Image (cartoon, grey):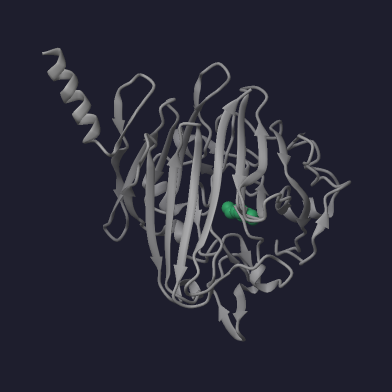
Amino acid sequence: MRFRTGCIALMSLILMPMAYINSTGTAKPMEKKAFGTTSDGKTADLYVLTNKNGMEVSITNYGGIVTSIKVPDRNGKIGDVALGYDTLDGYVTDKVYIGATVGRYCNRIGHGEFSIDGVKYTLAKNNGENTLHGGIKGFNKMLWEARDVSKDGEPALELRYTSKDMEEGFPGNLATTVVFTLTNRDELKIDYVATTDKKTVVNLTNHSYFNLAGPGSGDVLKTVLRIEADKLTPIDSGLIPTGELKNVRGTPFDFRKPTEIGARIDQDDEQLKLGRGYDHNFVLIKNKPNGLSLAALAEEPATGRVLEVWTTEPGIQLYTGNFLDGSIHGKGGVAYTKRGAFCLETQHFPDSPNHSNFPPTILRPGQRYHTTTIYKFSTK
Ligand code: BGC
């Protein structure tokens, strides 16, 4: 009898490709829940990924949005370290890209214009005269097709979206796949893949807002940050890169040694004034040109939570929630206030299509865009 029960248990594990084994030894599938209905009557789902250590990440196929990241502090107390909303509606009306997959081109394109082979493309402008995070209706407002691609005991969610030729003004049908894997090393690994049928530009990122002490626990100014960058791309008053690559030495942008985010944020510095704090692209020191390397490391002293960001990308945007003003109420009704979170958006540099000295963002038919970013959590 015991043998039969054992066989049945073993067989059901083999027959459960969507399942993984957690630390208590019980199998738990990636959970899928209805999240709400969009204005055009489509159902969005919420996928809850849990690894064997009990770390839990929730993602909706609306906008490819990471809605929560639950990790322990140094005493084992679980906390949600990502800003978000309780309902789909919060994400539908959101204007600050909380947790979103951002595309087709993250951050800004100056004057909403660029040229490829002498052909000028004019984009949807949604940030003054500029285009921000893909335009008026970016990838963060699209419903993605979802598939469970969990393997080797690690939950993984694949999201697919094809952006049509000339959507928001971008040329080419762009077939995009984003795979979110929650590894058993407490990493949220994001793989972005895209192909096109016409020359276009692509720059995809994730726009999670982190507060490692938990949203609603005050500002992030005491979080200690290290960024593996020796240069930044200074911006003008429209937050568009001037094209210069500026050495961080002797400036408030030198995070090569771990420094509190708030230590210099209010210094009398032209770049900080233009960004109302940090809202800048850092040029990463890449030991392996297109390989994965450590980009940033954030440590929250009170909880001991640590976030490492690894990426294949050449740049990272540090945004310190300067435009949050308390008017947005997120999960549990918490008001999201200025500097109540930070974003570390891995990317090619903003406005690259208009700067020939920046690493190119052009994608041609036959080429495959593939970038990887890892957000790894631990405690100290
Ligand atoms: C940008 C900010 C912008 C924010 C959108 C960041 O990536 O750099 O300027 O306000 O996204 O909410």
Q: Residue at x 73, y 64 (%)?
A: 241
Q: Residue at x 12, y 19 (%)?
A: 4
Q: Residue at x 81, y 40 (%)?
A: 264
Q: Position of residue 15 (x, y in %)?
A: 21, 36
Residue nearer the viewer, 184 or 245: 184
Looking at the rendering, which quadrant does residue 338 occupy? top right
Above or below residue 77? Residue 31 is below
Residue 203 shown left or right of residue 182 in the figure: right
Above or below residue 189? Residue 119 is below
Q: Which quadrant would the C terminus be assigned to in this image?
A: top right
The outermost residue toward the top is 2
Q: Position of residue 222 (x, y in %)?
A: 71, 30
Q: Is residue 324 visible?
A: no
Residue 275 shown left or right of residue 310 in the figure: right
Above or below residue 194? Residue 318 is above
Q: Position of residue 81 (x, y in %)?
A: 53, 33
Ligand 1 falls in which quarter?
A: bottom right
